[in-house]
Image (cartoon, grey):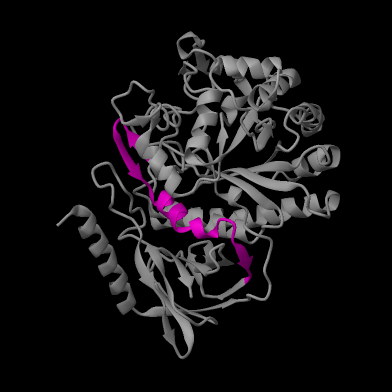
Amino acid sequence: MKFLDRAVLAASAMIMATGAQAQVDVKVTVDIGKPGPKIERAVYGQFAEHLGRGVYEGVWVGPDSDIPNVRGYRTDVVEALRKIKVPMVRWPGGCFADDYDWRDGIGSREKRPMRLNKFWGGVPENNAFGTHEFMDFVELIGADAYVAANMGSGTPRELARWMEYMTAGGASAMAQERRANGRDKPWSVKYVGIGNESWGCGGQMRVEYAADLVRRFSSYAGLHAPGTVRVASGANADDYNWTEVLMQRAGTQVEAISLHYYTIPKDWATKGQATGFAEAEWASTLRNARAMDELVTRHSAIMDKYDPEKKVILAVDEWGTWYDQEPGSTPGFLYQQNSLRDAEVAALTLNIFHRHTDRVKIANIAQMVNVLQAMILTDKEKMVLTPTYHLFDMYVPFQGATPYPATVAAPPYVLGEVSIPSVDVSAARGTDGKLWLSLVNVDPHKAMRVTTNLSGKATGRVLTGATMDAHNSFQKPDAIKPVSYSGKIVGGKLVFDLPAKSIAVVAVD
């Protein structure tokens, strides 16, 4: 029997076993009479920074590599990203962006200058992956481009020239230079970041100064691509004053402002391990992930004061889990394993975004490959899909869907000082016309019997594992992956037996 077959059978047996356990009763009511603003596809955006092995080896191996590739891009990674319908990718940073000169990454690769990646490990950066490579990459996977511009050490003219180089047609000198470098047709740049973490690695700025720079840089960012969404460098987590001042002084100059928030189990000094953790860290991580709801709510309320028509987007363009990097990995590369806990964090976070579609229309998980909460891990020619990847695959039907309010009556999951709802639900009408439900059980021990106010047939997939830190490795790449799942009708109501520590996504016909 193939290993994959054994893994699927084991997961199915575990789900059947949980069904035999005593279950906790949960009530879910979906109000399909109150549709909200649609879930923008860009909420499922990815982030690819020049950091560790995120770009080099993760995405780009070069056309002469023995690793199978499409014009230098890893074939396996390209195919995996296409499958989850990545809508948008943010690049080249992150902190890296505010020390990046876009001219270093154009022209002949053999003649591009060698720099040092001063933010991430001080390693050599040969600029083999530059503007052409990135823009061709997003076209290859069917995604939109989000370029993060250098406001920390760059100039408005550099930004204007870069935008002109990428988007101009006709006889423009920058367009001619682009053509000379091998690209005739202008690219489309849908999003441009005006700085990154200006309060930190992007310049250690005061918000008043940063707001003035946003006004200046944003006016040049749109000169050559007037339809581009300009995203101002926004707040760090709960710095509500940053949003207040930025909206007051520069809110009319941009189409979006950003918010960065990372979920950690402990604190920044000792974040905790990605695997081998105790239940206390499972609980604290999921509690901290749920804090995203308060952050979005409070930042949105401040934005409402200056933008009651909600024209300005709240772009959560860095989010995800951040642990101590894997023992033995290169310092500064932020490489970490990815477990069932990370899939739970992703599900809870995306469900929060689904409930705030009036403001949150852009989001980028950090990061796409080999860095932090990655979709994909690689080791030379090997590739493994993480539980977070599988969660994003399960959630594809929510891209572009119309959300409905879902009320959940469930007992809390309690451990020590942590007390959070044991079940989280998101409901939406997909572009396929089907009603899609996401059901998240955060309790690592108790199965839930979820009774809804719906009827009909419900089928889909569920993701769970034998342990809280169940994960895939290069030795066992399919140790955890989704398996088939369905609901049943009990007393005229659609009911789901939801295993402990699981996420289910189903279509209701």
Q: Is residue 381 magenta?
A: yes
| 98 vs 469: above or below | above
Instruction: Residue at the far front: name it.
Output: 170
- Is residue 283 something that shows in the picture? no
| 314 vs 19: above or below | above
| 239 vs 329: above or below | below
Residue at image location 47% in from the left, 19% down from the top: 128
Give the x, y percent position of residue 348: 53, 58
Depth check: 269 or 239 in front? 239
Q: Is residue 269 left or right of residue 32?
A: left
Count of all numbered marks drawn on residues in the image:
0
Instruction: Residue at the far left: name it.
Output: 1
Q: Is residue 178 left or right of residue 386?
A: right
- Is residue 209 something that shows in the picture? yes
Residue at image location 81% in from the left, 31% down from the top: 215
Q: Is residue 60 left or right of residue 145?
A: left
Depth check: 493 or 342 in front? 493
| 12 vs 276: above or below | below
Residue at image location 50% in from the left, 82% down from the top: 455
* Residue 496 occupies quadrant: bottom left
Location of the N terminus (image quadrant): bottom left
* Residue 15 occupies quadrant: bottom left
Give the x, y percent position of residue 162: 66, 22
Find the magenta span and give its range: 377-405
Give the x, y percent position of residue 68: 31, 31
Q: Is residue 383 magenta?
A: yes
* Residue 255 occupies quadrant: top right
Give the x, y percent position of residue 304: 81, 53
